Image: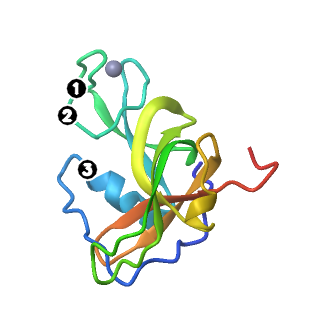
Amino acid sequence: MTTGSEPAERPRQRVLPAPTWESEAFWKGGFDGQLLIHSCRRCGRFFHPPAAACWRCRSTDVGPRPASGLAVVAAVSVNEHQWHPGFEPPYAVAIVELDDEPDVRLTTNIVGCAPGDVRIGMSVTVCFEDWDDVSIPVFRPLEEGRR
Ligand SMILES: [Zn+2]
């Protein structure tokens, strides 16, 4: 079950990904409120980025599966520069480790709090920023007692 249900407030513009057949579920699962991460049906583990084979056991019996959406901030940087006209600084760029598989790390934005308040070790939950063709997984602080 993915826990983030409220849509994320989105920037005016963003450089959007071009999904491939392997990554399409990851970039579109948010339209259904799901963080879809590739997993291996042989060894049962999640892996990311999505690929045609599991890097652990080389099985090609792989596909997207819903993750819980819970994660922990492993690294964070606050960007203060305006690199894109519609993407206003400051904003937090973070690497989060999924609770479901801690070696699955996503590069994302942390929203829903002041960028300077994001800390390594902070518990976060996924929410989605919907665009026309993709739904970007971003994360917000998990409320106390929700884990
Ligand atoms: Zn495997």
Number of numbered discs: 3
**Label 2 crowd (10 A; few <14 / some 14-19 / many >=20):** some
Residue 52: mark? 2
Q: Nearer the viewer, residue 34 or 77?
A: 77
| Secondary structure under the numbered disc 3 in the rendered image | loop
Residue 111 drawn above or below residue 120:
below
Q: Quadrant of residue 14?
A: bottom left
N-terminal-most mark, 2 or 1: 2
Residue closest to the far top: 57
Kind of residue sitting beneath label 2:
Ala
- Give how far across and how far down residue 89 sits, in percent: 43, 74
| Residue 4 seen | no
Name the residue rendered at 24%, 62% in the picture: 17
Kind of residue sitting beneath label 3:
Ser
- Give how far across and how far down residue 124 sits, in percent: 61, 51
Residue 49 drawn above or below residue 57:
below
| Residue 24 seen | yes
| Secondary structure under the numbered disc 2 in the rendered image | loop
- Give how far across and how far down residue 68 sits, in percent: 57, 44
Residue 24 drawn above or below residue 62:
below
Q: Nearer the viewer, residue 83 or 54?
A: 83
| Secondary structure under the numbered disc 1 in the rendered image | loop
Name the residue rendered at 35%, 76% in the picture: 131
**Label 3 crowd (10 A; few <14 / some 14-19 / many >=20):** some
Name the residue rendered at 29%, 40% in the picture: 49
Pointer 1: what residue?
60
